[in-house]
Image (cartoon, rainbow, N blue to C red):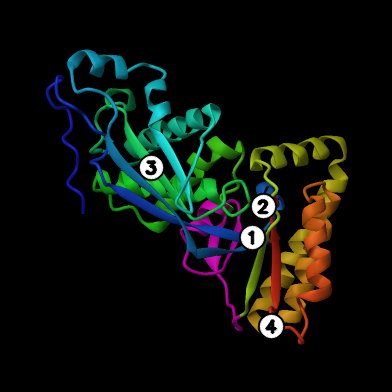
Amino acid sequence: MTTPVQQNPDKNSTRLLAKPQTTGVACGKVILVGEHSAVDGFPAIALPLKSQTLRIRFGEPIIAQSSETLALSSTADNSAWHQCWSLTIDEKNVEIAEQERARLTQSLALACELLTIDRQPSNLEDSFSDFVPQRIFIESKLPLGAGMGGSAALSAALIRALSEALQLNLGVDDVSRLANELDGVFHGRASGLDAATVVSDSIIRFQKGKGSEPILNRAGFWLLLIDTGERTATREMVRRVAELRGREPHLVAAHFGELAKLTSACEAALAKGDLAELGSILNQAHTQLQAIGVSTQGLDACVECSAKHVITNEIPPKVDVYLTMSRLA
């Protein structure tokens, strides 16, 4: 356990939010059924991708440790933190746009605020702007913007890193709840599904307002994830669905209702170990997503190809279930 950073030190000393090398880790996710409808309170089924992780690691302060530069760093808008972030995906450096840097800083400030409110008395007595900006490394095995829970994993990893720094013994439900608050910075409207999945240990059934619960998976199966290379922010997809709902509310409600039925059918298929039925359910779910405008040509082509060539007994090793990944969730 990391020793907590000294709080309220002499004003001329360096005040760090977290000691260098403090880390937090979370994994990616896959939604089997219930993309987008989960935002409106319909059930969904998802599973964590334990091998695909994202790590947050705090580093050294980025400014000289003088009282003058310390004062300059403590600006009200926290913009000095924007340049603290660096990102690697599969150990390759990735440039972070200025808008995303601002969102990352906003999520960090919100995390500090939530942890202060959530835990009274808190070890975090200073406001976020009182701390010296320090490097923060995002080390990801997840392709960001591909529907694999990158922002939720980042949010959960950030909460876990700060929990470590402040010696807070947060449970899984606490991490999930707080991570969902941060995820809203990136998504605009987060259902809680992603945050619940990236901290879970098994396939879960999730419903907004009711939380998550593990579900029975009777038969092991291969899950093929196809990354089409297309990237669209979740915020944009949520906006598209909201616009369609505004124009044709009954249409969206009907498709969400069908997704809810497919979610129940998916849970039953998993419990029975009926993989053929599970594959059929995923096909039907994709059709519903096409109808509300959140599929792409790349996704449609992958689904068509997979349906023809992947789910067969002739191709070894047999792939029983497939899911194309791009911007479905």
Residue occupying image coordinates x 35% and y 16% = 75
Q: Disc 4 designates what residue?
A: 318
| Label 1, residues with CA under 10 Å away: few <14, some 14-19, many ≥20 | many
Q: Disc 1 designates what residue?
A: 31
Alpha-carbon span between mark 4 and mark 1:
21 Å
Disc marking residue 294: none
Q: Earlier in the sequence, mark 3 or mark 4?
A: 3
Alpha-carbon span between mark 1 and mark 2:
10 Å
**Measured from the top left, where is residue 10 in percent x and y?**
12, 23
Alpha-carbon span between mark 3 and mark 2:
31 Å
Is 142 covered by the magenta stretch?
A: no
Q: Earlier in the sequence, mark 3 or mark 2?
A: 2
Q: Give the mark toward the camera: 3 or 2.
A: 3
Q: Are marks 4 and 2 in contact (CB under 8 Å)?
A: no
Q: Give the mark toward the camera: 1 or 3.
A: 3
Q: Disc 3 designates what residue?
A: 137
Question: In the rendered view of the protein, which quadrant contains the N terminus?
Answer: bottom left
Q: Give the mark toward the camera: 4 or 1.
A: 4
Q: Are marks 1 and 2 in contact (CB under 8 Å)?
A: yes
Alpha-carbon span between mark 1 and mark 3:
27 Å
What amino acid does circle 4 point to? Answer: Lys
Give the magenta range.
194-220
Q: Are marks 3 and 2 in contact (CB under 8 Å)?
A: no
Residue occupying image coordinates x 81% and y 40% = 245
Q: Are marks 4 and 1 in contact (CB under 8 Å)?
A: no
| Label 3, residues with CA under 10 Å away: few <14, some 14-19, many ≥20 | some
Instruction: Specify whether 105 is left or right of 192.
Output: left
Disc marking residue 38: 2
Viewer-closest of 121 and 306: 306
Which element type, helix, strand or loop, lies under badge 3? strand
Q: Earlier in the sequence, mark 4 or mark 2?
A: 2
Would you place residue 304 above or below residue 132 in this image? below
